[in-house]
Amino acid sequence: MKRILLILIIIIIVLQFFKSEKNIHPGIQPNNIAALYTVPADIDSILVKACNDCHSNNSRYPWYNNIQPVAWWMKSHIDDGKDELNFDEFSTYSLARQYHKLEEIKEQIEKDEMPIKSYTITHGDARLTTAEKNTLVTWSEGIRKQMETKYPKDSLIRKRR
């Protein structure tokens, strides 16, 4: 039993030498959603506290991110979040994808799927109040309405194949 424990400790120590790349790109990103649409200060503060760690190019990391394999798990989680929606790359999306992502923001907030529970457990400040949820939903719906008046409807609907 002591031998197994010693081997596990050695493995854990060796793992600490394999660091994962961090998602840190501070400053205003050129393809940020704010390059296309108005992001009021109240929306920006909600995005910073509850969304951007997984849905932008700049994550805030807790101290335990320096421990493997936690760092690998967090990197994977952040990469998945950015693949789904990245506010810092939003202006690179097609109009249809932008429109759809704004619709998903509304749906996932209303279903209480975002921010995810595993995130809010360790980031209590990321829990959204009812007022914050309503503010985000209203904002995303407002942008979708702007898009509907500015662009032809067929450019906002994804082509199904």
Image (tube, rainbow, N blue to C red):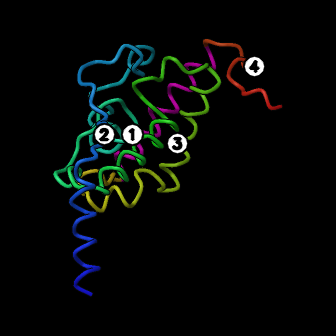
The residue under label 4 is which amino acid type?
Asp
Q: Which residue lies furthest to the right in this view?
A: 161
Query: Image quarter for residue 151?
Result: top right
- Considering only order in the chain, which callout, 4 or 1, is on the residue closer to the N terminus? 1
- At label 2, the amino acid type is Ile
- Give how far apart the Cα atoms at labels 1 and 3 are: 10 Å
Sooner in the amino-acid sequence: mark 4 or mark 3: 3
Kind of residue sitting beneath label 1: Thr
Residue for badge 3: 106
Residue ID for mark 4: 154
Q: Is mark 2 on a helix, strand or loop?
A: helix
Q: Which mark is residue 94?
A: none
3 or 142: nearer the eye? Answer: 3
What whole-number distance in Å separates the C-alpha atoms at marks 2 and 4? 31 Å
- The Cα–Cα distance between marks 3 and 2, rounded to whole angstroms, is 14 Å
Image position of 86 with respect to 66: above or below: above
Specify the amino acid type for callout 3.
Lys
Mark 2 — residue?
Answer: 46
Real-space CA distance between mark 2 and mark 1, rounded to the nearest whole angstrom: 9 Å
Answer above or below: position of 62 versus 155.
below
Cβ atoms under marks 2 and 1 closer than 8 Å: yes
Q: Is mark 4 in CB contact (under 8 Å) with mark 3?
A: no
Q: Residue at x 65, y 24 (%)?
A: 96
| Residue range highlighted in magenta | 130-149
Q: In this view, does 83 lie above or below 63?
A: above
